[in-house]
Image (spheres, rainbow, N blue to C red):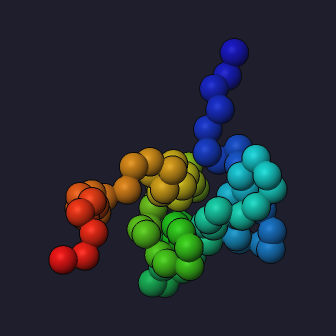
Amino acid sequence: MGQWHPILAAVEGPTGVWRLIDPQGREYGRVEIRRILDGTDTRYKAVWHGEVIGWATTLREACERVHGAYVRSHGPVPFAGYPTLGGPR
């Protein structure tokens, strides 16, 4: 039995752009193909919330980067300090 991979969340369109879709049908990131230098090399741009989070040499790796950011966004947030329970002084 095969395993699920973030690339399975990718829907291509328009050409050269893969949109990663969550279970509710919302786009949570995208990967865009780019030709580098003289057009003989290919890279994949990983985009999360409109910001480039990295470049990859394979579509698989780029999808993993975007999906990793998506999964981390559901985790604990940085410590914000202890609340003031005594009220204003």
As drawn, the residue found furthest toward the top would be: 1
Q: Is residue 51 shown left or right of residue 14?
A: left
Quick one: 12 or 35, which is closer to the camera?
Answer: 12
The relative height of residue 36 versus residue 11 in the rendered view (above or below) is below
Q: Position of residue 79 (x, y in %)?
A: 27, 57
Q: Residue at 71% across / 44% down in the picture? A: 8
Q: Is residue 20 shown left or right of residue 42?
A: right
Q: Is residue 24 shown left or right of residue 17?
A: right
Q: Is residue 33 shown left or right of residue 40?
A: right
Give the quadrant of the N terminus: top right
Q: Position of residue 15 (x, y in %)?
A: 78, 72
Instruction: Tell me if I can see residue 61 in this picture.
Output: no
Total numbered badges shown on the rendered structure = 0
Quick one: 78 or 9, which is closer to the camera?
Answer: 78
Quick one: 76 or 13, which is closer to the camera?
Answer: 76
Q: Position of residue 17 (x, y in %)?
A: 70, 70
The image quadrant that residue 55 belongs to is bottom left
As drawn, the residue found furthest toward the left would be: 89
Give the quadrant of the C terminus: bottom left
Q: Residue at 53% across / 69% down in the picture? A: 48
Instruction: Tell me if I can see residue 60 in this picture.
Output: yes
The relative height of residue 48 versus residue 89 in the rendered view (above or below) is above
Q: Position of residue 35 (x, y in %)?
A: 55, 77
The relative height of residue 22 versus residue 44 in the rendered view (above or below) is above
Quick one: 62 or 66, which is closer to the camera?
Answer: 66
Q: Residue at 68% across / 58% down in the picture? A: 20
As drawn, the residue found furthest toward the front would be: 89
Q: Residue at 48% across / 56% down in the picture? A: 73
